[in-house]
Image (cartoon, rainbow, N blue to C red):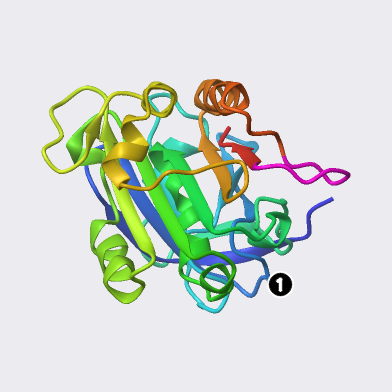
Amino acid sequence: MANWLTGRVKNIKWWNDRLFSLILNAPIEGFKAGQFTKLAMNVDGKRITRAYSFVNPPKERDLEFYLIKVDGGNLSCPLSNLQKGDEIEISSVSSGYFTIDEVPKSEQLWLLSTGTAIGPFLSILQQGDVWRSFQKIILVHAVRAIEDLCYQELIFNLCNKYTQLKYVSIVSREVNPSGLEGRVPKLLESGALFQFCGIEPSINNSQFMICGNPQMVKDTSVTLNQMGYERNRRSTSGHITVEQYW
């Protein structure tokens, strides 16, 4: 059972009319980059809770969450209406195994995300451990429209700071002049993603972390399986680590 604390809203940043970042302060216990916690609000006399991954690294005091406002969403709509100084409940303890210490060390690390599921990858990339474990890191962010490619300043600052990082944007419903168009599984299957990056993975040198909607995670996992990559398990090391984002 979660132990609940009262957090306070420090800021809300809107990226467009659907996507926003919620920044809170609360004295939670320590967490690992890639983990999630739970937020809760009382809405019309009913307590609603949802799990959200951290965007910030563990060392930062500000707790940041990347959210999408869903029409009729039981919690996303109330969260989107919060103002600076408002109170919100947050679990004191974080959870999850979508962390770097669960991934075998390798030459290449491919971070494949869709939508707001880029959040845990941004947390991972802002801490030091990942840079000591992999020689090349490829951050892939797939969205529907160009305006949904958020956190660009943070991403490009990371690319400038760490030369081993490459960023690839994928857009499915518009022309993407600076990246790729389509969907992650198809771009893997065709080899277009690897050609764009100029990096060729193999079962001997690569790890894949996948975070996104359940269908994307399933389809991408199946595609990688067909290419010879296997799921990482506690009993057997493989190449694929997954997190479904709802």
Label 1: which secondary element = loop
Residue interval drawn in magenta: 232-239
Q: Residue drawn at (53%, 40%), measured in percent from left and top?
A: 211
Q: Residue drawn at (50%, 25%), measured in percent from left and top?
A: 216
Q: Quadrant of residue 149?
A: top left
The spot of residue 196 in percent (x, y) is: 27, 40
Q: Residue drawn at (54%, 59%), measured in percent from left and top?
A: 107
Q: Quadrant of residue 72?
A: top left
Q: Is residue 196 above or below residue 185?
A: below
The spot of residue 221 in percent (x, y) is: 59, 27
Q: Is residue 122 above or below residue 227?
A: below
Q: Residue drawn at (52%, 31%), measured in percent from left and top?
A: 74
Q: Nearer the viewer, residue 32 or 5?
A: 32
Magenta span dominant secondary structure: loop
Residue 136 in sight from this viewpoint: yes
Residue underneath mark 1: 29
Q: Is residue 240 magenta?
A: no
Residue 78 in sight from this viewpoint: no
Badge 1 density bin: few <14, some 14–19, many ≥20, Cα 10 Å: few
Q: Quadrant of residue 164?
A: bottom left
Q: Is residue 237 magenta?
A: yes
Tell how many labels: 1
- Could you tell whether 23 is left or right of 39 in the image? left
Q: Residue furthest right?
A: 235
The spot of residue 75 in percent (x, y) is: 51, 37
The spot of residue 204 in percent (x, y) is: 62, 47
